[in-house]
Each structure stands twice: as C-alpha cells, then as structure tokens.
C-alpha cells in the first residue's frame, strides 16, 4: 500500500523542505489501525509506505527503480538507480 503525497497537498506532506515527519507517522498509524483493514496484506505485513510525488520528477524510470529496490532489497542489492539514470542521460545526451 502506497500513499503518494507532496508538500501542501496532503495532511501528511512529504518532499523538499519537510522537516517534521510527525504528521506522516500519525497518518501511517491511522492507516495501520483502520477498522476492517487488519486483513489487508500491507497492513498485516507492516508494509505501508509513503512516497513523495517529487521523487518522480527526477526521471520516472529512476523513481520506479528506487521503489523496486525499496520493496525487494534482497533481490536488488546491486541496483544503483542513480547510476542507471546517469548512464541513460550520458548515452542520450552524448
């Protein structure tokens, strides 16, 4: 389960300039304790994540690689999303 959010548009804003993460932690706890959601796999497995929509502004493919690495760290230990992006930009702009 993923909540995408950005500064100023959510009750739990994320992104550049956000210092106080207490609202995010409170919102996550609210989601985790929502009645009737106790059988949702993301809730049962403590896998509720928040992702700033600003993260996809770098490059969508890089953003997806970061998400994949977050969700499957054991399978993607060697993956370096920023290196992928830099190589792609070098090849495209060369």
Image (tube, helix red, strand yellow):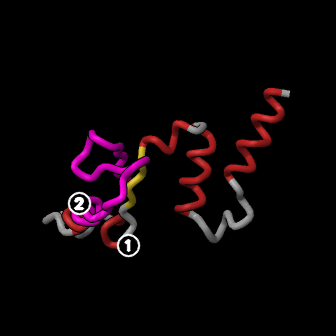
Using the image, determine if residue 18 lies above or below residue 42.
above
> The N terminus lies in which quarter of the figure?
bottom left
Residue drawn at x 60%, y 37% as measured from the top left: 59
Which residue is tagged 2? 27
Label 1 sits on a secondary structure element that is loop
Residue nearest the observer in this picture, 69 or 86: 86
When asked about the image quadrant of residue 61, the answer is top right
| Horizontal side, residue 60 vs residue 38: left or right | right
What's the CA distance linking mark 2 and mark 1?
17 Å
Res 8 quadrant in image: top left
Quadrant of image for the C terminus: top right
Identify the residue at image location x=35%, y=43%: 6
Q: Is residue 60 above or below residue 92?
A: below
Q: Residue at x 32, y 62 (%)?
A: 21
Magenta range is 2-28
The spot of residue 49 in percent (x, y) is: 39, 59
Residue 13 among magenta residues:
yes
Residue 74: image quadrant is: bottom right
Query: Residue lying furthest top in this view?
Result: 93
- The label shown at residue 45 is 1
| x 27%, y 65%: residue | 22
Question: Which of disc 1 and disc 2 is earlier in sequence?
Answer: 2
Q: Alpha-carbon neighbours of circle 2 within 10 Å: few (<14), some, or many (≥20)?
A: some
Where does residue 7 sit, x and y in percent of width and height? 33, 43
Most distant residue in the right direction? 94
């Amino acid at each position: 389960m993923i909540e995408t959010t950005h500064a100023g548009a959510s009750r739990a804003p994320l992104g550049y300039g956000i210092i106080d993460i207490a609202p995010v932690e409170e919102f996550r706890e609210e989601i985790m304790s929502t009645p009737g959601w106790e059988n949702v796999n993301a809730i049962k497995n403590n896998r509720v994540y928040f992702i700033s929509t600003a993260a996809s502004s770098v490059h969508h493919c890089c953003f997806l690689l970061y998400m994949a690495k977050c969700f499957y760290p054991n399978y993607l230990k060697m993956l370096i999303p920023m290196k992928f992006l830099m190589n792609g930009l070098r090849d495209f702009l060369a």
